[in-house]
Amino acid sequence: MKPYFGPASSRPGLSGPARRLAALLLCAAGGLCAWAAEARPALPGDLPIEAFPDSAAIRKAYWESFFTAPLGALARRAPATVSSDRGSFRLSYLRDGGYHYAVVAAEAPPGAKNGSLLYTQGTWILKRSPRDGAPLQAKVFLRGDAGTFLRIYPDGDRSTMDVVAYGGVLNQGVPLPVSFEKAFASPMSDIVAWTGRIVDWSLFSPKPGLYRDVRSFVERTRERLGGLRYAYDGALDTEGNPVLIATGERQAGETGLNCSGFAKWVVDGFYGPLKDRYLDPLAMARKRLEERVTDAAGPYESDLDPFFGLDWTRNLAVALLDARYPSRPHSIKEVDVRISAFAMIAGKGGLAMPETVNGSSGYDSFAAYQEGLGYRADGLKALLYVLALREPGNIYLASISRKSGGAIPGLSRHYHVAVLAPYFEETGEFKVAAFESAAETSIEAIMGRLPKDFAHLVRVRADRNYDPPLLPD
């Protein structure tokens, strides 16, 4: 690939403290960083929607005495733990940004670092008007994640609902056939039954066994990372020798992989056991001009190679597919991710952070797949969540692009490649392993560093024969 613009923390020759400092500086320049995301960690032990921790009996019994009590009386009420046949829940009052909140919080699962986090799966938060205390909305956390919830609103004598998963607005304005009070007091099973023709509730009932190969891929990749190094324009050839991508010549000095070479190293881990050789980097660098040339990019194809990452990731994915199923050739249509998962995302204010109660209810638009670009990076985690449920067992090669300025405004350049592996743990929580060059980073770091850049994804099926090559000394 052309000059490396990947994470400073993954470059060679940096000690542990230097790596952390480089990453912090990069985060400060680019926005939200991984350390900020760690302030609201995902909680362990998420349950499928059928086993959702349900406080319906408590919400119904305490509607008048707690949830809609006069604001003065509500503010004076001490937190209390109450129990039902579905478990113990904690009632508490909070005030934030002038609004009043009545909370019924599910117990944090074993292993949670903070038992009082508001976004425990099964927690309901009732937001009330600062003027007259009227209910404004209810927020229900569907998983142990601050960005995954329902919002239920009063709508005359009925109510409506939004469904948000990891920041992606999957459904907005879903009608409920009951009043807000009735909806607030209802079990999750009723809400699912009322909306089953509109909401895809299967997205909240993953089957962890379907992700064994992806979990195995993540573990094996982590085991091999210690033997890798970064090197500009570096990749391995068909025999596993370190070469330069641009020329195929042997690397001089300390050998290693750049972000593109690392993505090939991953795919070689699947390709090698099938073919007893690795992919040819010169072949993987082939331009796919007939599939994406534009008037804007044409004059710069030779000098800037603006679509290198896009062509490279597509070539890798198609080559592996051809090796696995040699009876016919395959096309980019079979590897490109082009689904329309959602059209809006919850902005930073829309996610419930630990230091706030309910967040803003505003959403930002999120464009559908854009040809040659993919998706805006700030929606990546939500997109990967949907992909993990709809395409269990896949990992994804991401080609990151950014619009240039200066003499060539508007030209998008694919400047970086990452490997993303979404999966569910056996205990139910959703995770994304993110690898960039010779290091593991995080999906939150990528989204925070590059929020307005685009990520084009191609799918690669994980399997247990994964054996990535060793980097020669």
Image (cartoon, rainbow, N blue to C red):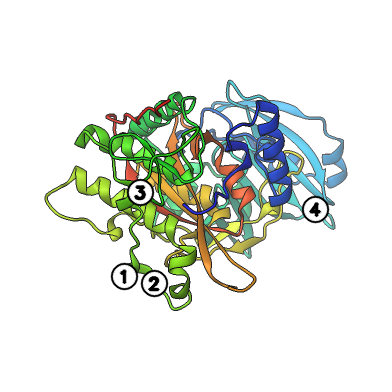
Return the residue nearer the eye: 308 or 170.
308
Left or right: where 387 falls relative to 56: left
Work out how far the residue at label 3 is from the one at label 4, CA to CA, in angstroms: 50 Å
If you read the primary sequence from the N terminus, does the residue marked by circle 4 or circle 2 appear first? 4
Tags 3 and 2 in contact by the CB under 8 Å rule?
no
What kind of element bears circle 4? loop
Left or right: where 278 falls relative to 307: left
Which residue extends farthest left?
327
Work out how far the residue at label 1 is from the one at label 2, CA to CA, in angstroms: 6 Å
Which picture quadrant has residue 332? Answer: bottom left
Work out how far the residue at label 1 is from the one at label 4, CA to CA, in angstroms: 62 Å
Q: Which residue is mark 4?
A: 133
Q: Which residue is mark 3?
A: 459
Q: Is any atom of residue 204 visible in this view? A: no
Tags 1 and 3 in contact by the CB under 8 Å rule?
no
Q: Which residue is mark 1?
A: 290
What kind of element bears circle 1? helix
Which picture quadrant has residue 443? Answer: top right
| Callout count | 4
Residue 123 horizontal/vertical position (percent): 62, 37
Work out how far the residue at label 4 is from the one at label 2, CA to CA, in angstroms: 58 Å
What kind of element bears circle 3? strand
If you read the primary sequence from the N terminus, does the residue marked by circle 3 or circle 4 appear first? 4
Of the residues tagged 3 and 2, which is closer to the observer? 2
Look at label 3 and name its amino acid. Arg
The residue at 54%/33% (across/down) is 53
If you read the primary sequence from the N terminus, does the residue marked by circle 1 or circle 3 appear first? 1
